[in-house]
Each structure stands twice: as C-alpha cells, then as structure tokens.
Image: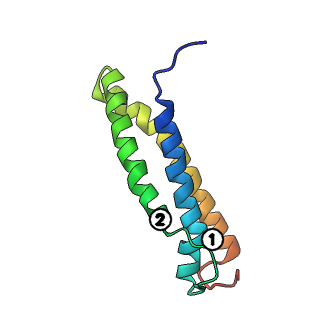
Amino acid sequence: MKPSNRLLELDCLRGIAALSVVLFHFTFGYDNSNHMLDPSKFYFTYGSMGVQLFFIISGFVIFMTLSKTKNIFNFIITRFSRLYPAYWICILLTILITTYLNFSTGSYL
C-alpha cells in the first residue's frame, strides 16, 4: 500500500465541520427561515461554526498542495478540474429541485 501524505485527522475534522453545518441547516436554519421555532425542538445552533472550521482547514490544506505543485498554472488547472464539475452539478440540482418543489411559494410544506 502506497503511503499517503494526507493528514487523516484533518479529513476527520473537515467531515465533522461539514456534518455540523448540515445538522444546523436541518434543525435551526430551516426552522428559523420558516418561522416555526419551537422551544421543545432540538436546534443545533453551533453548526454555523463548522463553516469557519472548514475554511481554516481548507486554507491549511491549500498551502500543503501548493508546496507539491510545480507551478501556479498546474495548481489552477488541478483545482479547477476538481472543483468546478461538482459546483455545476450542485447548481443544476438546486435549480431542478427548487423548481420541482416550488420553494418560492412555500407550497412544499
């Protein structure tokens, strides 16, 4: 097995940060935007801190990636080819889902 230069601890922290943001959106964020807050419900309000943690870790990892690349052009191409396909898929899925469920009128509730 080939040794990896990845830091498993950072991957775990990024996963925890992403899951905390998802939990925030499914509890507090969604309920707050629809004005249905109820004291008896569970709200994960600290999930918004996951965004900051995710960006701190990502910034650190980008510098690790920069140290391995030969030039800035190679870095830009690899980042672009890795991130933009997922970005456009998410945009298209969001458009399709929000159009299908008609989120603008609130008829999905």
Q: Provide the secondary structure element on which disc 1 rests.
A: helix
Q: Nearer the viewer, mark 1 or mark 2?
A: 2
Return the residue found at the far front: 40
Residue at point 32%, 28% (across, down)? 66
Q: Provide the secondary structure element on which disc 2 rests.
A: helix
Q: Are marks 1 and 2 in contact (CB under 8 Å)?
A: no
Residue 104 spot, x, y in % from top left: 59, 81
Residue denoted by label 1:
98
Residue 49 spot, x, y in % from top left: 42, 60
Residue at point 31%, 24% (across, down)? 67
Residue type, mark 2 in image: Tyr
Q: Quadrant of residue 75?
A: top left
Residue 68 spot, x, y in % from top left: 35, 22
Separation of marks 1 and 2 at Cα, in angstroms: 26 Å
Q: Which mark is residue 46?
A: 2
Q: Which mark is residue 26?
A: none
